[in-house]
Amino acid sequence: MHSRLHSSLRFLVFSWLALMASGSFAAAQDHPDRTVQPGVPQGKLTSGEFSGSQIFPGTTRSWSLYIPAQYSPDQPASLMVFMDGAGYAKPDGAFRVPVVFDNLIHQKAMPVTIAVFVNPGVIKADLPNAADRSNRSFEYDSLGDRYVRFLLDEFLPEVLQGLNVSANPRDRAVGGISSGAICAFTAAWERPDQFGRVLSHIGSYTNIRGGWEYASLVRKTKDQPKPIRVYLQEGREDLNNLHGHWPLSNQELAAALQFAGYQYQLEMTDGGHSGKAGGERLPEALKWLWSDAPSTVVPSQETSPAWTPHPDAVVRDGVPQGRVEELPPWESQIFPGTTRKLSLYVPAQYRPETPAALMIFQDGERFRDVGGRWRVPVVFDNLIASGEMPPTIAVFIDPGHDKALELKNNRASNRSFEYDSPGDRYVRFLLEEILPEVRKKYVISDDPNLLAIGGSSSGAICAFTAAWERPDAFRRVYSSVGSFTNLRGGSVYPSLVRKTEPRPIRVYMADTSGDIDNQFGSWPWANQQMAAALQYMGYDVKFDWAEGYAHNSDFGGARFPDAMRWLWRKEQHQPVLDTRGDLGGDLTLLKLLVPGAGWELAAEGLGFADALCADSEGNLFYCDMRAPAVYRISAADGTQSRICAESVSGMEITPEGFLIACQGSKKRIIGIDSKTGETRAVVENVVPNDLALGRDGWVYFTDTGASAVKRFRLGEFVVSTVDEGISKPNGIAVTADGGTLAVSDYGGRYTWMFRIRSDGTLDAKMPVMPMRLPINQQGEFRMGSAPPYLEASKGDGMAVDAAGRFYVTSSVGVQVFDPTGRPCGVLPVVHRDQPLTTCILAGSDFNTLYIAHGTRLYRRKLTVK
């Protein structure tokens, strides 16, 4: 187990080194500025190691410093900092920065510039046979000012000591590749007063740790762009994996930079996720970066092609026609103070004895209009008559508006709030208010596969949100020119899709290159991102795309009958998964989940389930806290037996078969003989919540009320505090090699990691696991902003598997992280009204994940290794 974990971590380190070394150097050497030239003065390269960080405690890192031959102490030099510095400094690597700098400085194509090459931090293991842990992703992929503070406050003052370096941000640049590229961008974004130029190679503007947000953040600065100049290089065949789609993300960021008026250049090159193309173009990239040359300008793609209706959108002789009936205006309780138009289409083939399919259209009047672009009644008549879709009742519902005001030019409309806001508010409105009224008049199927929902623009994202939140109610989605942008946070969806267990929904999408590009986002790039995410995760999705057009119904309307054919087809979808873009260290959900294997009930009728643990044979132990009782489920035959009558909140088992369990209500930790059920106090006068076993008999436990992590040693039983400051420390786990401790925070946004020292103490404390937070439905859904999230993740019990993944239970589900803390995805809760308290890997092969979920236990098979 230890060697597998160690190999996984080694791969994460070697993979970024491979990025830097990759490339066909025979071709690269053709550029004269990448080779040593006679008569060109050569700078000097020195190196060292830095280990004194307080911002990234416990890390060490190597670095190199290039000082050009032309440097003079009496003249301030320019500065350029390279992340993943070893690869950039390597004289025969992909980039060869010292050689390129020598040549360009000699040509006066760039200023006299000192280069600092800094590598990511590593947390070296203190225990024998434990694995070192790379801190690269936490440092590089995280948004915020933590890394740039490290550069400015800790690292650069030491490395640049005694050198005369300009303080003018126009003389200071940052650069990097992949995660190092987004790190460089973040540094300049957070501190444009310190760094005014950014060099980005195949940048990870994806959802490794939230970098997808930059496209939206950049657009919000249009009125006051930050004074930074950005060069972007991206490969057309770059990665498409659990974190995102690199080519689309780089182009989406470039579109945002152009919209907001930044100085930028985007070069789309051949190749994938390597330094080859960026290295070959480095001299020209640096010439542009250090100059005032003009930016890339991509012209608008909007056109107005002639429109004719689809043949199936024209009334046909002999086709039975359904009827449209108006319903009284609807006044909502979920959207109080609003009223809206509501009408129904009922097909001629409807029979009360046969439950009908149903499809809801947002902006209903436009879809109902038989002289418009969609002409739903006509299309449904034709397709139902031809047998290409089932007899389907259509609900046409308009957005609400303030019933006390006249609806004029949408000034009193509630449309954006209802349609663009993520969360379950709108779908609850449909399920609790509208559908019951429809069912009073007509017999509608209860099968979610026969319930569809659709819309255009904001109505399209509204339709997707409804099915995303309630796939038990809607499983077919129609989207035309969907607003998967940052109107009210909808730009999060591609990232959520890639890191959430796939939901059983079928999605049709249509968009065009001429769609809107404004302060809320680029509709063409957003729709391409959404389609790519759905395709990557194996969804049943069809994406119709066209060049030109605009933000209107022309293209979507022309394709609407064919879209309905595809959406209602009887063919069963067989997912085709392509994980070639996942690097060796990328632990995607697609590799973890077993196709067709979902949650199975393992126990029910419990008072409150908690305290899961497993012994070396894979037998499961758990507690029903309200019985009270501790039980054992056999890994061999699944039989359950009662061990003792105790209520415990956290439990582990020693190799000798002795259960160690938390009894906070009695202010003690107890020991339970797993065979006889005999119980005795181990430690008293403590208030434990959960615990984990470390090496050498150390037991670590959380004291949630005291915001503390504490420890004692079996056989000694002297309690000491090893950490304070996590708001509500709850779940706790030790990695298989014993070198790392993780602690969840019930009241916060992160799960924390520590290094375990040889004496059992903890250090290198960092919030490396960002928890997905639940949406606060009572919060303010502001235009141009992310959805309002609750501050508390309710991070609870946790487990670690043989590959080093961490599983953390929370209010949104089981959140899965890789060994370095990168989010891998979420397995959603089974029951929204039941707490999810803890989890464990058990079973004879430890490939079965068990969860304690309120009054039930569930299990599912996984592919852990």
Image (cartoon, grey):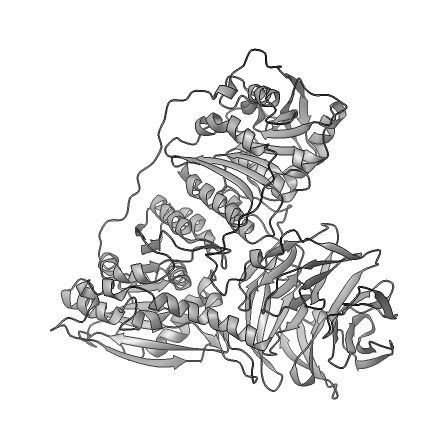
Quadrant that contains the N terminus: bottom right
Q: Quadrant of residue 844?
A: bottom right
Please say if 366 is above or below 470.
Answer: above
Q: In the depicted view, which residue is nearer to us: 211 or 471?
A: 471
Q: Which residue is drawn at 87% across and 77% down?
A: 676
Q: Where is residue 781 in the image (x, y as percent from the top left)?
A: 57, 44
Residue 297 appears in the picture as rendered? yes
Q: In the depicted view, which residue is nearer to us: 535 or 727?
A: 535
Q: Where is residue 718 in the image (x, y as percent from the top left)?
A: 73, 86
Q: Residue at x 37, y 60 (%)?
A: 188
Residue 417 appears in the picture as rendered? no
Q: Where is residue 316 in the image (x, y as percent from the top left)?
A: 54, 13
Total numbered badges shown on the rendered structure: 0
Please say if 556 is above or below 264.
Answer: above
166 displayed left or right of 824: left
852 displayed left or right of 293: right
Q: Residue at x 34, y 56 (%)?
A: 271
